[in-house]
Image (tube, coloured by chain):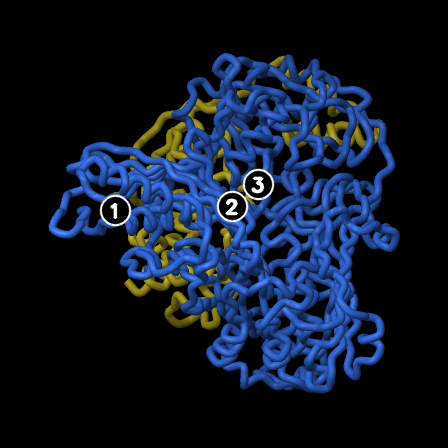
Amino acid sequence: MKFEEPAGQNLFDRAKIVGKSTPRIDGPLKVSGRAPYAYERHDVAPNQAYGWIVGSAIAKGRITAMNLADARRAPGVLGIVAATEHKPVGTSRFNHAPLFGGTEIAHYHQAIAVVVAETFEQARAAAGLIRTEYADGEGSFDLAKVAPGAPLASEKLPDYNRLGDFQAAFASAPVTVDQRYTTPDEAHAMMEPFATIAAWEGDALTIWTSNQMVAWSKRALASILGMPADKIRVDSPYVGGGFGGKLFIRADAVMAALAAKAVNRPVKLAMQRPLMFNNSTHRPATIQRVRLGAGRDGRITAIAHENWSGNITGEDGENATLQTPKLYTGANRLLENRTAQLDLPEGNAMRAPGEAPGHMALEVAMDELAEALGMDPVELRIVNDAKGNLPGEPEMKISDRNLERCLRTGAERFGWSARKAAPAQMREGRKLVGLGVAAGYRAAPTQKSAARVSLGADGTIAVETDMTDIGTGSYTIIAQTAAEAMGVPLNRVRVDLGDSLSPVSAGSGGQWGAASSTAGVYAACVNLRRMIGEKLGFDGDAATFANGHATLGEQSHALSDAGALSATGEMEFGAFQKEYDIGTYAAHFAEVAVDAYTGETSIRRMLSVCDAGRIINPLSARSQVIGAMVMAAGATLTEDLHVDKRFGYFANHDLASYEVPVHADIPSQECIFLDTLDPMISPLKAKGVGELGICGPGAAIANAVYNATGIRMRDYPLTLDKYLDRLPAIA
Amino acid sequence: MQDKGIFNLSRRGMLAGSAASVAVSQGTIASAQASQASSSPPARMAVNLTVNGKPHRLELDTRMTLLDTLREHLQLTGSKKGCDHGQCGACTVMVNGERVNSCLSLAVMHEGDEVTTIEGLGSPDDLHPMQAAFVKHDGYQCGYCTPGQICSAVATLEEIRKGIPSHVTEILTGRMRPTNMEMRERMSGNICRCGAYSNIVDAMTDVARG
């Protein structure tokens, strides 16, 4: 099925299940500990042995010797696959850092061996007996040092990166802001480690793993291991968090596969938590310069966003400029994105890559501009909202954009009018109180997506697709879609996800999963309805499917009358979508309290108002948004991978020293979804929200800290050491 | 790079090995460690545990954590391994009614103990009130930290009921209340990277009110 024109009125506009808050259908399994994650699948292959990954102790250079003899003799050891004894595995088009093999070391904690033993304890103990010697190489680890000479990123900027004459317009603007902001390297730090059970049957490999993109990973693993993709099965039904970190095949899958081959037994392994931060990918640090020039009326005439980040050769950096041309007007524009070469671990996608740190700079600069203008920050954003058209993209139509409504609704609900424009004016006892706002934009892409929908002889519906649920709620929205389309109650629908034997879906990434995968399920349902119609002698397209029956005119059949049937379907998204800027929009608000004596910052309230079309399941969509707000809070206040610039690695590589938010940091949060529909996105008119939620809340918090204290910090995270000595005098 | 190699070895050696090796010099750690580990089989011990009401007599490698005993030996995989270092709380279970990080506890230390895991609190068809409240309030996303959160939540409410004070308890003499901050403080050893905190506290508030 092809989505070739804007969606008209359809069954989802009369929906009884889609659009209703629905507790997750996988919930009872998750809360009772019965949902099986990758490492836990004792049942899938007999006689599983345990693997332990050894990571490189240097960041750059080569291995000169590995003494494996003692480890091989250790009790319980079944085998060792070591880098010195194995040629480098291949790469895939999805990532560049070497995953294993050979003596060259490209980054710290690169996998250099896997030890396989009868038990976990034996594998761990034996791994400690491996003696590795290295020849240290020179590496480049300091972004600030190499940024000035960094070339433009290979990733091409759109041709609207330059408009008018920025320099002249900025020079003549009556009110300007010119500031530099930095964001640190960040870790996904998902709760479930990378984990895989691998088993070979002849030349065929199955991995039970934890991965967001099953079809990508099947292809990538084939290229990495040099084997045909059709000999690989990837199964990933439950994913304990990904945030972009599990978009790709990682060392766990490669090492488990090689180890299982070597010992001729299924092997299970999980990457040890202390290895995860340097072995895998991270969000690269950025240096950003934002220049805004405006008239006294607040209208932006000149806008420049320059970005520097670093990555290994062949990879793009973190392009923080992405949202800037989409949010605001400004006839004169300059965007520039540069990527320096670094020898840190590979930087790659983390939730809203580019936009998440981009908003942390742009939306603080907007706060600074509002202050310079003496204008309310909400009004400033509304005045410059690029709602009519996007400067530099005259042919582009905007599908459905309600940013102004987000801002106005949020201001009213949050009690924005109580904010004092001058900073450090709101005091409650020993607390300095401040409010902050930020706007948010994230694109709403789609990817083709397929599913198989089956009717059981008992009238139940089963959906199979390789779509993943990474906590996003895919199980439930897919069940809702199938229930709605087939006219059965939700509890009559079973959903099986994450198996590469099922039809290929869009997968979970880029905020495209919900829109794309539900459209694919709908396509399969349409085919199944036709098939049922053919079987029972009516036009499946014209019939109404409700209450377990298909009805057309006088004719009505129970679905079970059709017997068991199965249909696949795929939704492809037509070229017409390219004529539209299809985005999601938000207004984020935060209230913070800063202790006037100790400087401790605590978040008191957070609100996000989101415009993302139809919300298929408001309960789980809200969770995605508030969860993203939490991640934004971490990025703003605590999260910081500290680069050891001498030895070239992230020094704080565990969950004690890489500080993500905990319960005590996060107050009650609110999320409001505007009641909007976007007919350009899919038949369900629904867009994703998982990344929108992290685009902006961090800046809102930073702006609130400024409003509370009068201290403007531009180097994230806003830790106490950066402002304790600048707190207002205690009266 | 010789130096770093030795450092690396001794660090790993420490992880793997016995306390006796700590006293000797770096150079000898490696060989002492190597010969010991490669020649003698790992020590095993019997331990009697009651897990979710069911008694078990297990013969275990003394290095095996309570968490791995549950997950690998008894195949109760509801308790999760997020970090194996006591930093994330995903492995939280109840031992004799009190919550512990089961990854930081060796199984053989638990002779005679009663362990309750997430599987013991309830099943999909018969959920514990806290489990049901998590479903109702969407107190999770990916679900990986969830069993630990639920075990911690149940224990937290019990700690408050017993009047055990925390860092944020405002009045130590009166009756302790399950306030928002009191619950959040006590739950802060359980990380949820999906960020379901606000919903988890809503679920706990529901259960606390009964």
**Which chain is painted in yellow?**
B
Relative height, residue A203 to residue A121 (above, below) = above
Q: Which residue is mark 2?
A: A447
Q: Residues within 10 Å of mark 2 (few under 14, many from 20)?
A: many
Q: Position of residue A30 (x, y in %)?
A: 38, 44
Front one among A45 and A686 = A686
Residue under disc 1 on the same chain as residue under disc 2 = yes
Could you tell me the amino acid type at mark 1?
A: Asn
Q: Quadrant of the N terminus of chain B?
A: top right
Could you tell me the amino acid type at mark 3?
A: Leu
The subunit carrying tag 1 is A
The picture quadrant where one finds residue A441 is bottom right
Residue under disc 3 on the same chain as residue under disc 2 = yes
Are the residues at dot 1 and dot 2 in contact (C-beta closer than 8 Å)? Answer: no
Q: Which residue is mark 1?
A: A491
State the separation of the CA atoms marked 3 and 2.
15 Å
Q: Which residue is mark 3?
A: A247
Q: Position of residue A24 (x, y in %)?
A: 35, 50
